[in-house]
Image: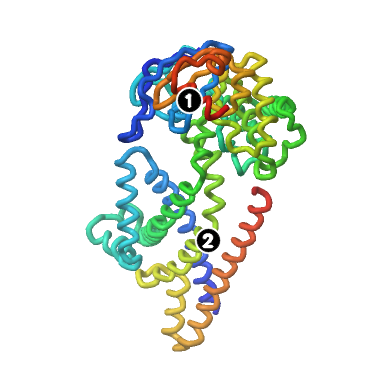
């Protein structure tokens, strides 16, 4: 049981890091997608399409296990760090593609008049985004972003096949020693349920608070 | 103050402005009237760069707006704009709506900006609404806040794009009153409106636009009682 809990801790840590990464990637690529420069728009579109049109597991195999075969990445990052960094970045990029679409839709959902009003008092494009558009867009983005966070937590279970240690990996180790497959997987499923259920509840609460304070 | 030369604007194939030239003096109140689709709103929006002219020249307070090196956000500090739909920042309180420009754009202190905001709210008759959100106010109140927000930037020119068109009839008066006060204080104003009473009473000059051209212009007296052009007479007979 201790071993499973150790795995749970790793799963949570890994999820937090990847969720932060995916929001950063999502924001950067969403802003590129909405840019005036067609080059930036193009890069962003290609990124989103590539990561949405291939399975995450394949992306993980490709980047975590495939790349070291052709590039000396293990020397750059170190034998033990590379798989961790690569796995986090891969999941971050994958989920980031979906976050890009969420943020883009959120920004486009803000009434055009808000942007014009901000410009008319002399705000730069950056100031308009920062003080007027993003705060309003963020509110609409909370529900889909929470869904994405829940998805991210579930997707970290795909790290076991590429050899990154987290809850599923630990569970497999315990099962191979004890043969108690049914009990162990039950525990793992319940633990996932508890984290993800908690996340959605906290988010629902946050969303309600936002509504009251800032109509 | 404002100089417009041969202004053209097209949206795709549709040419909305077909060569508009005009000169607006300091402290002048110019009222632009005309049927829908005449190009009057587009003309106004070109004046603060919300629309980019296809051709022509616009100069405001000595700065050429249509010059490629002109930073539009710098110019807009001098040009206040009031929209038909108010466009108050929905996520900010009334106080923040008014102070965000002075604080973030002009880099004034919080105290200074808030003092100015209180003064302006008093002027538009909305003291005590500082902590409200836009959705809690009526249309007329929102529009008065929008005027205060524009004034907080201490602009040299104020542009009004049909400021009373989205209001319930009983709220039109309160907004027009604020605009009249402003005109009396000597603000340079360009007002696109259907309020002929306002045009008559406050306007120094009335411009009649139709089909992308300035058809006729003159003092309110000249336009409303002695219009020369057939199209002007026709329009006025329908609206008065």
> Tag 2, which chain?
A
Q: On the picture, is A95 further left or further right than A43?
A: right
Q: Which residue is mark 2?
A: A146
Q: Residues within 10 Å of mark 2 (few under 14, many from 20)?
A: some
Tell me: residue B182, above or below residue A74.
above
Q: Residues within 10 Å of mark 1 (few under 14, many from 20)?
A: few
Q: Nearer the viewer, residue A182 or A151?
A: A151
Residue occupying the point 69% across, 36% down: B170
User: Residue B167, how many percent across, how many down?
Assistant: 63, 37
Q: On the picture, is A165 further left or further right than B179?
A: left
Tell me: residue A12, above or below residue A37.
below
User: Residue A95, how many percent across, how many down?
Assistant: 41, 59
Color style of the picture: rainbow
Q: Nearer the viewer, residue B183 or A24?
A: B183
Q: Which residue is mark 1?
A: B234
Residue occupying the point 77% across, 35% down: B128
Same chain? Circles 2 and 1: no
């Amino acid at each position: 049981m201790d071993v499973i809990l150790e795995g749970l801790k790793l799963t949570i840590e890994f999820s937090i890091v990847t969720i932060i990464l995916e929001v950063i990637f999502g924001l950067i690529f969403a802003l590129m997608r909405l840019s005036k420069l067609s080059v930036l728009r193009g890069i962003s579109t290609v990124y989103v399409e590539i990561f949405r049109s291939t399975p995450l597991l394949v992306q993980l195999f490709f980047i975590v296990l495939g790349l070291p075969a052709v590039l000396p990445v293990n020397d750059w990052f170190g034998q033990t760090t590379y798989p961790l960094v690569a796995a986090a970045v891969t999941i971050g990029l994958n989920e980031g593609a979906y976050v890009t679409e969420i943020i883009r839709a959120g920004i486009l959902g803000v009434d055009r008049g808000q942007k014009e009003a901000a410009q008319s008092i002399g705000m730069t494009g950056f100031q308009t985004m920062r003080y007027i558009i993003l705060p309003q867009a963020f509110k609409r983005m909370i529900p889909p972003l929470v869904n994405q966070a829940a998805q991210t937590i579930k997707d970290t279970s795909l790290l076991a096949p590429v050899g990154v240690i987290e809850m599923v990996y630990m569970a497999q180790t315990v099962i191979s020693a004890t043969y108690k497959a049914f009990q162990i997987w039950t525990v793992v499923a319940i633990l996932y349920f508890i984290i993800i259920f908690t996340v959605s509840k906290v988010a629902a609460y946050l969303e309600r608070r936002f509504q009251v304070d800032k109509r | 103050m404002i100089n417009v030369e041969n202004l053209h604007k097209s949206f795709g194939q549709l040419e909305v402005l077909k060569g508009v030239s005009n000169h607006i003096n300091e402290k002048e109140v110019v009222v632009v009237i005309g049927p829908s689709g005449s190009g009057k709103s587009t003309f106004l929006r070109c004046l603060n760069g919300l629309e980019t002219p296809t051709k022509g020249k616009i100069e405001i307070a000595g700065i050429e707006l249509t010059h490629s090196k002109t930073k539009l956000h710098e110019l807009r500090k001098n040009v206040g704009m009031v929209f038909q739909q108010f466009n108050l920042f929905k996520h900010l309180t009334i106080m923040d709506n008014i102070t965000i420009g002075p604080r973030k754009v002009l880099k004034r202190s919080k105290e200074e900006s808030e003092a100015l905001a209180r003064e302006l709210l008093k002027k538009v008759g909305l003291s005590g609404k500082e902590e409200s959100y836009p959705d809690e106010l009526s249309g007329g109140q929102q529009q008065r806040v929008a005027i205060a927000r524009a004034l907080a930037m201490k602009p040299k020119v104020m542009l009004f794009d049909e400021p009373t068109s989205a209001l319930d009839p009983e709220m039109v008066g309160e907004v027009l009153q604020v605009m009249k006060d402003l005109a009396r204080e000597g603000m340079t104003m360009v007002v696109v409106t259907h309020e002929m009473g306002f045009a008559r009473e406050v306007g120094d000059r009335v411009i009649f636009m139709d089909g992308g051209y300035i058809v006729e212009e003159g003092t309110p007296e000249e336009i409303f009682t002695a219009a020369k052009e057939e199209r002007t007479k026709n329009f006025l007979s329908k609206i008065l």
